[in-house]
Amino acid sequence: MKEIEKNLNGAGMRIGIVQSRFNEVICEGLLAACRAQLIQQGVRDADITLASVPGALEIPLLLQGMALSGKFDALIALGAVVRGDTYHFEIVANESARGVSEVQLHSGIPIANAILTTDNDGQAEERMNTKGAEAALVAIEMVNLLKALA
């Protein structure tokens, strides 16, 4: 059996990040962890492009624009949707995830989805560093997997 090895070398990759400004402290934590991990894996800071949007529902549209630009090897979605007292949480959580998945499948560009969906701010703060770093690793690994298939 032939097995494609896990490869987390990000050297030479161009990464686009779309970050929500809603729940700003959490999103900044996600970004800091993500950026640090990308650099640790060999992605040059100059090859990382960050764009911010008002909230999680706006993330997929900007991801689509970045994917269609041909300028990126992978994209990363960063955001935080914290449960409130209304049904709005479910709409934002579900529709942002659906939109990210659709862009990835239609464009063929890997997208690491680190839009946190939590019951409270504390849960989001506990997860932001881990999930931000994991998103960087997912993006790099997926680019390398697709290259290995080609």
Image (tube, helix red, strand yellow):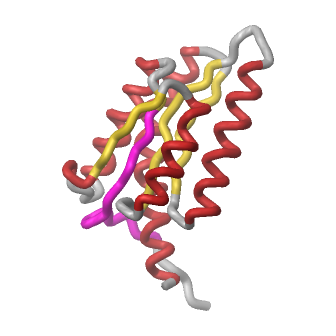
Taking the image as shown, residue 89 lies to the left or right of residue 7, namely: right
Check if residue 63 falls in the magenta segment.
Answer: no
Q: In the displayed image of the protein, which residue is found farthest to the right?
A: 87
Q: In the displayed image of the protein, which residue is found farthest to the bottom?
A: 1
Check if residue 12 falls in the magenta segment.
Answer: yes
Tell me: residue 62, above or below residue 80.
Answer: below
Tell me: residue 122, above or below residue 40.
Answer: above
Q: Residue, x 62% and y 19% (percent of image)?
A: 82
In this rendered view, identify the residue nearer to me: 26 or 106: 106
Quarter of image, res 32: top left
Q: Which residues are magenta?
A: 6-19
Tell me: residue 127, above or below residue 16.
Answer: above
Q: Residue, x 31% and y 63% (percent of image)?
A: 13
Please provide percent x and percent y for residue 27. Answer: 44, 27
Q: Residue, x 70% and y 12% (percent of image)?
A: 84
In this rendered view, identify the residue nearer to me: 2 or 116: 116
Q: Give the number of marks.
A: 0
Dominant SS type (magenta): loop
Please provide percent x and percent y for residue 104. Answer: 59, 58
Q: Residue, x 44% and y 34% (percent of image)?
A: 19
Please provide percent x and percent y for residue 108. Answer: 56, 67
In this rendered view, identify the residue nearer to me: 89 or 145: 89
Q: Quadrant of the N terminus?
A: bottom right
Q: In the displayed image of the protein, which residue is found farthest to the top?
A: 85
Taking the image as shown, residue 62 lies to the left or right of residue 33, namely: right
Please provide percent x and percent y for residue 5. Answer: 47, 76
